Image (cartoon, helix red, strand yellow):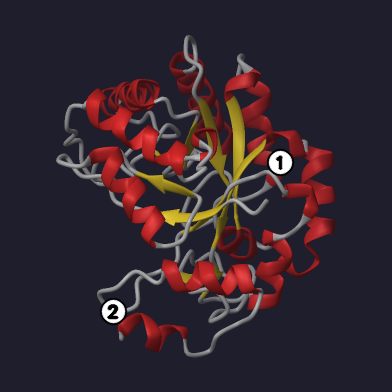
Amino acid sequence: MLTIGSHVSFNSKDQLLGSVNEALSYGANTFMFYTGAPQNTVRSKIDDTITKKALNIMQENKIDYSKVIVHAPYIINLANNKEDDKYDFSIRFLKEEVKRCEQLGIKYLVLHPGSHVGLGVDIGIDNIINALNIILNDTNVVILLETMAGKGSEIGSNFQEIKRIIDGVNNKQNIGVCLDTCHLSDSGYDISNFDKLLDEFDKIIGLSYVGCVHINDSKNPMSSHKDRHENIGFGMLGFDNLINIIYNPRLENIPKILETPWVGEYPPYKYEIEMIRNKKFDPELKSKVIC
């Protein structure tokens, strides 16, 4: 069965209940959310009563909670230890996010590996490994390293770098990978022959490590290293290529999450999910979203 959803909101009042209801309004059967704003440290206390109500609604609507994803905030950078206090903050804050996932009962937490900001790839990777071994010392949460576009000094824009991080993590059961279609293409991987790409990933890392796929079109051509998402079928990757990825049998049980841009002031996810389920591109999608 196709497990498809999108990024949804998580606010201090409705929390997980609001996230579930938003996902259902899009026709989704999974979703991804931040437990607070991705650019700051403000976090509301998790209300277990609200979480229980949300879990009941998910059960009624046959949403597999084990495939719901949390995304770590952007302000975390585990690759940079130029300043001890900032590095320690990233470790401490991500540890707190892991605890919030534990309280919510979330299994998977997607993380941007980090940027070495001039320290070099080797030192950056060592810093990430050190931090992850501290954070994953005692938890059931699985951190999924997201494949990156290679913008600036980002680490994780090729499979070899992600493999090195995984190799250094002590608790292998707590580490995995989130494939991002836009990032893969922008970093130089040809997603038009996705089975070949999966063969390469399997040889270097292993397909068993894939825990999530971010489905995004790209505004830029392959190897651009830009990381600018586009709506499904309206970018350089193309609708057919993305459909082939979404329905690839080797990733059948993996949740697919849309992170495509809003159209004006409106989310496109309801229409994109419908288009994906129908396997038919709708060139009028953007006008429908606005209407």
Q: Position of residue 128 (x, y in %)?
A: 50, 28
Q: Residue beneath label 2, please?
A: 264
In this rendering, the answer to whether 137 lies above or below 172 is: above
Q: Quadrant of residue 125?
A: top right
Which of these two is toward me, 69 or 121?
69
In this rendering, the answer to whether 184 lies above or below 250 is: below
* Amino acid of disc 2: Gly
Q: Position of residue 197 (x, y in %)?
A: 78, 56
The residue at the point 71 percent across, 41 percent down is: 160
Q: Quadrant of residue 57?
A: top left
In this rendering, the answer to whether 169 lies above or below 115 is: above
* Residue count near mark 2 (Cα–Cα under 10 Å), binned few <14, some 14–19, many ≥20: few
Q: Are marks 2 and 1 in contact (CB under 8 Å)?
A: no
User: For the residue labelled by badge 2, is the local secondary structure a helix, a strand or a loop?
Assistant: loop
Answer with mark 2 or mark 1, whichever residue precedes in sequence: 1
The residue at the point 68 percent across, 44 percent down is: 253
Q: Residue beneath label 1, please?
A: 160
Q: Is residue 11 left or right of residue 112?
A: left
* Amino acid of disc 1: Gln
Q: Position of residue 71 (x, y in %)?
A: 41, 42
The residue at the point 30 percent across, 27 percent down is: 93
